[in-house]
Image: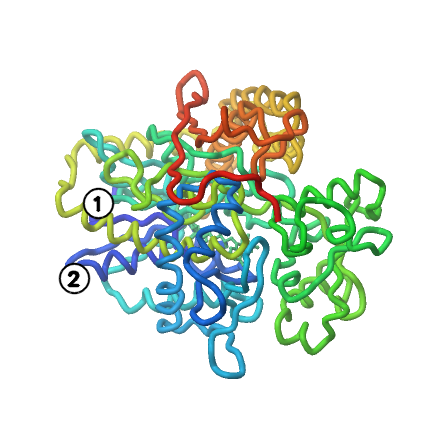
């Protein structure tokens, strides 16, 4: 019989958002137990790789909650939900301070106050950092703190494949124990998705291999809408070839972006970033780089054309104090030492603004289902996220979802065990049938690569109606071929092939949602830059796109934007 476990709250994902949610849940109620189910060991979650910093207001530095809120809403090109943004900016300093109490070693000024660095699109320096290994220190502090609670029970290397819904509410998950290959059932009163983003839908990304949109697909398949999926963020400073990120902190600390002629084009030419120059928002700088390359001012390299990031004028001492990891990455992966040479860079897919539709509490419209972190769209990033808001978002909304899930669970039931078990067993049978299924003529790797190509050419930095439509039809075809994939490996123990198959299934759901949302939005807003429709069109498009799963394919819908104190205006810097 299938092994089953019962906890009050099931958290799926052990990154920044998942760990924060789990801690908040057990702190909210001394009787509550939490299952922390994660496909990788928590410290291997993508949060660990964040470099630059986490944003929050600091007193006495010319900042205010209002300014942080305004920068975020403007950065979002006025698509952010302003109630979510207000809650975020207010909680941000409390969360970052709490994290310090749990051991996070924020870098400090000589006078002992917390150090902050400037980041793109932010009016004042409000990005807290721990050198340029911020994600590592944050995740480590969260993980260590979580170990204090016996009531957080970890199920590492368990891959969640299905949400168990009973009587209209989520009551658990079915998960594959990767080590044994056995399916297991996790029963609970509420489930929090904290599964991160989906950068691997694209070929050239800063994202780790595990970022395959699993949680977005789980919610989508259970009938929850995916919101604002067309808004995907390109980061302007990735290393050509690998896509490894050179953090925005390198521009925050004073780095220059140069073309082949050694010109600081963000200063000398009109790309809409104004005085901000290198500290303009990511969407605008990524576009400027593409336009420079198209104008023949890029540098040719083995991985296509690129521009450059110059840190030489900062000097070795500053680079070693503030950006040691940038130096290490550049030396190893680009063969240049930024103390002496500029770093080759180009825009690289980095982050999903869209995700599982939630309100400010982290609740989805499906009772019992919550989501937080990059998997969620609590709508604080709108059409373009500001760098360093997302680590803080994981803490603020992870904590909120944890508390809300506990409160919800008090009034909810466990669900009918026999029915849940039947659903989990059916899911187990589906996985068994897929494992080592040799009949089938399609290869996982080939379909994945076709999907990635379709996404890059259809939904890249600049988009065109025709290429977006092409991506929509290519993806529909790839998806139907997915039903015919062949798997070679029939073994149960650490079968990574079946994981790759499941991940590809999730990515295809997400990719389709991105392409369909993008193709319908005949305007340009934030990261969605449409060449045929270069203007923002508030009259027709000031709404969140929603995509729902239907047997016949994705169904589009819309949702209104919560606008309170900041009225939409032209986005100029
Ligand atoms: C290279 C890089 C640098 C960045 N730098 C910054 C920065 O400086 N500042 C900033 O604000 N943001 C930064 N970001 C963005 C930010 O780091 C992420 O958005 C954030 O860390 C996401 O955290 P998360 O908890 O939502 O997900 P993740 O940390 O990605 O964790 C996801 C978790 O879900 C689990 N999971 C996924 N699918 C399943 C499944 N099917 N079953 C079970 N478990 C599953 C995984 O095991 C993992 O534990 C950066 C991102 C990258 C890629």
Q: 507 or 97, which is in the foreground? A: 97
Give residue 30's mark.
Answer: 2
Residue 514 against residue 371 in the figure, above or below: above
Residue 520 against residue 134 in the figure, above or below: above
Residue 22 pos. (x, y %): 30, 56
Q: 119 or 325, which is in the foreground? A: 119
**Quadrant in the picture for the N terminus:** top left
Residue 295: quadrant of the picture: top right
Q: 6 or 206, which is in the foreground? A: 206
Q: Is residue 290 left or right of residue 5?
A: right
Residue 346 pos. (x, y %): 71, 48
Res. 498 visible in picture:
no
Q: Residues within 10 Å of mark 1 (few under 14, many from 20)?
A: many
Residue at disc 1, secondary structure: loop
The structure residue drawn at horizontal position 30% and vertical position 52%, both measured from the top left corner, is 400
Residue 233 pos. (x, y %): 57, 43
The structure residue drawn at horizontal position 43% and vertical position 57%, both measured from the top left corner, is 392
Residue at disc 2, secondary structure: loop
- Looking at the image, do the residues carrying marks 2 and 1 touch, with CB atoms under 8 Å apart? no
CA gap, disc 2 and disc 1: 16 Å
Q: 177 or 8, which is in the foreground? A: 8
Give residue 188's mark.
Answer: 1
């Amino acid at each position: 019989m299938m092994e089953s476990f019962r906890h009050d709250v099931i958290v799926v994902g052990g990154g920044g958002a998942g760990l924060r949610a789990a801690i908040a849940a057990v702190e909210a109620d001394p009787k509550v137990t939490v299952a922390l189910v994660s496909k990788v060991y928590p410290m291997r979650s993508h949060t660990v790789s964040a470099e630059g910093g986490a944003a929050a207001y600091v007193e006495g530095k010319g900042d205010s909650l209002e300014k942080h809120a305004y920068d975020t809403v403007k950065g979002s090109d006025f698509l952010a939900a302003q109630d979510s943004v207000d809650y975020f900016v207010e909680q941000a300093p409390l969360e970052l301070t709490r994290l310090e109490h749990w051991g996070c070693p924020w870098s400090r000024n000589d006078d002992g106050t917390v150090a902050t660095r400037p980041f793109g699109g932010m009016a004042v320096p409000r990005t807290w950092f721990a050198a340029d290994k911020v994600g590592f220190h944050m995740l480590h502090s969260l993980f260590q703190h979580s170990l204090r609670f016996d009531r957080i029970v970890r199920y590492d290397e368990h891959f969640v494949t299905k949400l168990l819904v009973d009587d209209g509410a989520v009551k658990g998950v079915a998960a594959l124990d990767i080590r044994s290959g056995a399916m297991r059932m996790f029963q609970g009163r509420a489930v929090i998705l904290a599964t991160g983003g989906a950068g691997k839908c694209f070929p050239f990304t800063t994202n780790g291999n595990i970022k395959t949109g699993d949680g977005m697909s789980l919610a989508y398949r259970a009938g929850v809408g995916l919101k604002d999926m067309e808004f995907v963020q390109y980061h302007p400073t990735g290393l050509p070839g690998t896509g490894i990120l050179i953090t925005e902190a390198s521009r925050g600390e004073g780095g220059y972006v140069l073309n082949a002629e050694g010109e600081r084009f963000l200063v000398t030419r009109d790309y809409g970033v104004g005085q901000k120059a290198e500290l303009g928002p990511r969407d605008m700088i990524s576009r400027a780089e593409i336009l420079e390359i198209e104008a023949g001012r890029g540098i040719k390299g083995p991985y296509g054309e690129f521009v450059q990031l110059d840190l030489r004028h900062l000097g070795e001492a500053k680079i070693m104090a503030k950006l040691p990891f940038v130096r290490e990455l550049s030396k190893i992966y680009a063969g240049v030492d930024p103390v002496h040479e500029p770093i080759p860079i180009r825009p690289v897919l980095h982050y999903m603004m869209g995700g599982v539709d939630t309100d400010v509490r982290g609740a989805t419209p499906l009772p019992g289902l919550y989501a937080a972190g990059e998997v969620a769209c609590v709508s604080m990033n709108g059409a373009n996220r500001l760098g360093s808001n997302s680590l803080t978002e994981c803490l603020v909304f992870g904590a909120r979802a944890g508390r809300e899930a506990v409160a919800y669970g008090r009034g909810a039931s466990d669900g009918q065990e026999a029915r849940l078990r039947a659903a989990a067993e059916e899911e187990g049978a589906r996985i068994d049938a897929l494992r080592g299924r040799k009949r089938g003529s399609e290869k996982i790797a080939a379909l994945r690569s076709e999907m990635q190509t379709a996404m890059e050419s259809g939904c890249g930095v600049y988009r065109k109606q025709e290429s977006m439509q092409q991506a929509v039809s290519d993806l529909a075809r790839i998806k139907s071929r997915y039903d015919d994939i062949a798997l070679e490996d029939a073994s149960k123990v650490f079968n990574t092939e079946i994981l790759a198959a499941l991940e590809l299934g999730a990515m295809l759901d997400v990719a389709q949602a991105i392409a369909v949302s993008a193709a319908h939005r005949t305007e340009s807003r934030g990261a969605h830059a449409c060449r045929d429709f270069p203007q923002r069109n508030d009259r027709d498009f000031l709404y969140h796109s929603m995509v729902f799963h239907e047997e016949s394919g994705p169904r589009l819908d819309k949702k209104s934007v919560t606008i309170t104190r900041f009225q939409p205006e032209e986005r100029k810097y």
